[in-house]
Image (cartoon, grey):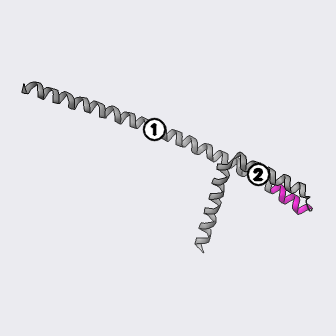
Amino acid sequence: MAFSISRTRDEAIDDLDRQVTALKRELSSLRRTAAAQGTHLYGEVAERGAHAYDDVADIVSDLVTRLSKRRPSRREIERQARMAGAVVTDHPKTVALVGLAALGLAAVLLMRR
């Protein structure tokens, strides 16, 4: 009887070892998948941020150029504001990210003084 209990115990331990090994492999696979997706999402957000920043910079540059040349009409100002609003609407997370980065930079510059 002692032989069968010992054998069953050894089989159970071997089975648990196999399960733990399989779980470790699965966890490793999940970590690789999450890392790959995180890298992809970071690249996508950075690209969207660059596009949104370029769009906003173009709108602001155009607006500053027009303002410096002549006094714009109310319609032109409203059109430029709608264009800027459209960029914010199209890329809200990116604009928020760029805004937070600008605030962080300003905070760092103020802390240096």
Give left or right: position of 63 versus 10. right
Give left or right: position of 45 versus 6. right
Q: Mark 2 — residue? A: 85
Residue numbers of the magenta segment: 61-71
Q: Is residue 33 above or below residue 51?
A: above
Q: Is residue 99 above or below residue 106?
A: above
Q: Position of residue 69 (x, y in %)?
A: 91, 61
For mark 1, give the secondary structure: helix
- In the rendered image, residue 73 lying in the magenta stretch gets the answer no
- Image quarter of residue 12: top left
Give left or right: position of 7 versus 66. left
- CA–CA distance between discs 2 and 1? 39 Å
Q: Mark 1 — residue? A: 32
Write the residue at 65% across / 54% down: 96
Q: Position of residue 22 (x, y in %)?
A: 33, 31
Identify the amino acid type marked 1.
Arg
Identify the amino acid type marked 2.
Gly
Q: Is residue 93 above or below residue 34?
A: below
